[in-house]
Amino acid sequence: MSKGLEYFKEVYDEVPGWVQKMHDYSPVVLDHYTGLRGEIMQDDALSRKEKDVLLASMNAARLYVRSMGYHTKGAIEFGTTLPELVEYFLVSYLYGGTAALKVSLEALAYALELKGKRVEQPEKDPETIEEIFETMITWLGDEDTSFLVTSLAAIQNGDKEKVEETLLGEGHVSSRMKHLNMVGNYITQLRGADAIPWIEKARAVGAAEAELADVGFICVLTAGIPAWFEISDSLQLVTK
């Protein structure tokens, strides 16, 4: 088995079909991709745990279920708690609305299964924001759901600024990480100009330039090299 196939078998417990096909058509391309992925996904300015959970949330925001699932697995394996995971998915709601939060239910169910917790699906698919929150709270059981309760109340109130303030506020996840998540939501959609205000907000709550660069790097893995073009225009040059 090639190094690329071995790497992905270790990451996912099996070789995904897309990896096998990349290998079959060009082992060299797979090896280069594996090297890039391995370099980006190591602990750096952001930890491996943070990178995986950010990618899970960013893919929920753009309704990309396959990649959301892969990175949910990584996030749980590297120590993300269920309340943390849910807070990241609330950030996807700020970008993608109810559709993004509904998609995130698939990842939450998967995360619960990975932790050996039984998931009982509701009788009908949750559609409204209230039904989605109710499902999340029910599934979390004895976990801390206070942030979910507060967030739902803010959403129901209808004040957009209050919703943003609440969902991006300090909880099990720092406000800094949530703002970095919002930057990534825009960059994965190649909306660099729209990401600029969020980059400034992220800096204002303590995000370091190296952390912003790490967000750009992980966006490359899920949205391609153009994602780096979109964020690089807003990154400060490194002075040596």
Image (cartoon, rainbow, N blue to C red):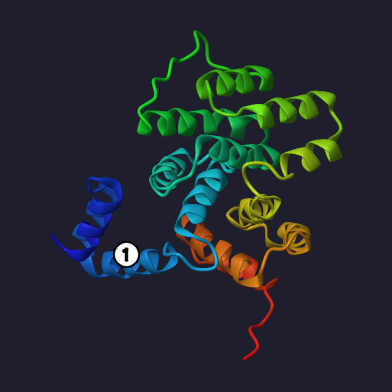
Q: Is residue 197 above or below residue 16?
A: below
> Foreground residue, 26 or 70?
70
Above or below: residue 14 compared with residue 205: above
Residue 118 sits in quarter: top left
Looking at the picture, how far across and down is residue 6, in whole percent? 20, 58
- Residue at 59%, 29% in the rendered image: 144
The residue shown at (38%, 32%) is 115
Q: Is 29 positioned to the left or the right of 135 in the image? A: left
- Residue placed most toward the observer, 62 or 207: 207
| Whether residue 173 is situated above or below residue 218 in the rendered picture | above
- Disc 1 crowd, CA 10 A, few/some/many (<14, 14-19, 20+): some
Q: Is residue 84 left or right of residue 21?
A: right
Is residue 235 rendered to the left or right of residue 117?
Answer: right
Residue 232 visible, this angle? yes
Q: Is residue 98 above or below residue 35?
A: above
Q: Give how far across and how far down residue 120 sits, in percent.
A: 44, 15
Q: Residue furthest bottom?
A: 240
Residue in the image at 63% along x and 66% along y: 212
In the picture, which quadrant includes the N terminus? Answer: bottom left
Residue 52 position, x and y percent, is 47, 51
Nearer to the camera, 113 or 71: 113
Asked which quadrant contains residue 190, the reply is bottom right
Image label count:
1
Amino acid type indicated by mark 1: Thr
Report which residue position mark 1 lands on: 34
Q: Residue furthest top?
A: 123
In terms of secondary structure, where does tag 1 sit? helix
Q: Quadrant of the C terminus?
A: bottom right
Residue drawn at x 68%, y 62% is 192
